[in-house]
Amino acid sequence: MAKELGVGRLLIAVYGVFALSASARALYQLFTEFQLAPVAYSLSAISAVVYIFATIALARPSLRKFAGIAIWFELVGVLLVGVLSFLVPQWFSHPSVWSGFGSGYGYIPLLLPILGLIWLRRHRA
């Protein structure tokens, strides 16, 4: 049980780091560079909101049922934006968190929701 709790805490911590970093980056992009890549920077802001929501939902057992929704939304977003960033690269001249399937972030944005969904499935309340 303690081992499972440790993995859950690590997952929440990673989501928290992504929430903070994506939020800071999105705010910077929206206020200083938005005109350079409006689609990419708007999607960066959306990703920040998703990471914040997922972090809160994972951390609060009473909200954990909503974590799956946020994480599925995140995974679909990563896949959709990943494909779009290859099909319409001019929209992503400056990479967002999810463009290129998260390649600029070591593919963590692609792997994180998969791991999150696996963890949630194993720890249903």
Image (cartoon, rainbow, N blue to C red):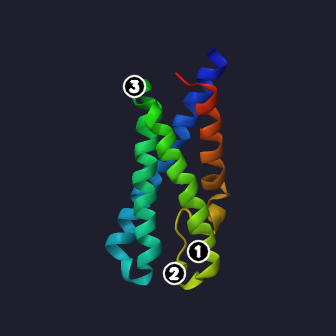
Decide: is 21 above or below 120: below
Residue drawn where x is 58% and y is 29% of the image: 8
Residue 106: x and y in percent read 68, 58
Decide: is 31 above or below 72: below
Residue 34: x and y in percent read 37, 77
Circles 3 and 2 in contact, beta carbons < 8 Å: no
Q: Residue extending furthest left?
A: 31
Q: Amino acid at mark 2?
A: Trp
Is 120 positioned to the left or the right of 58 in the image? right
Residue drawn where x is 61% and y is 67% of the image: 82
Decide: is 31 above or below 125: below
Identify residue for label 3.
Answer: 62
How busy is the neighbourhood of tag 2: few (under 14 within 10 Å), some, or many (20 plus)? some
Q: Secondary structure at mark 1?
A: helix
Q: CA distance from mark 3 to mark 2?
A: 38 Å
Of mark 3 and mark 2, the one earlier in the sequence is 3
Tag nearer the camera, 3 or 2: 3
Locate the N terminus by quadrant.
top right
Across the whole image, how many numbered discs are drawn on residues?
3
Residue drawn where x is 43% and y is 71% of the image: 41
Circles 1 and 2 in contact, beta carbons < 8 Å: yes
Residue 84 tag number: 1
Residue 52: x and y in percent read 41, 46
Q: Secondary structure at mark 3?
A: helix
Q: Amino acid at mark 3?
A: Ser
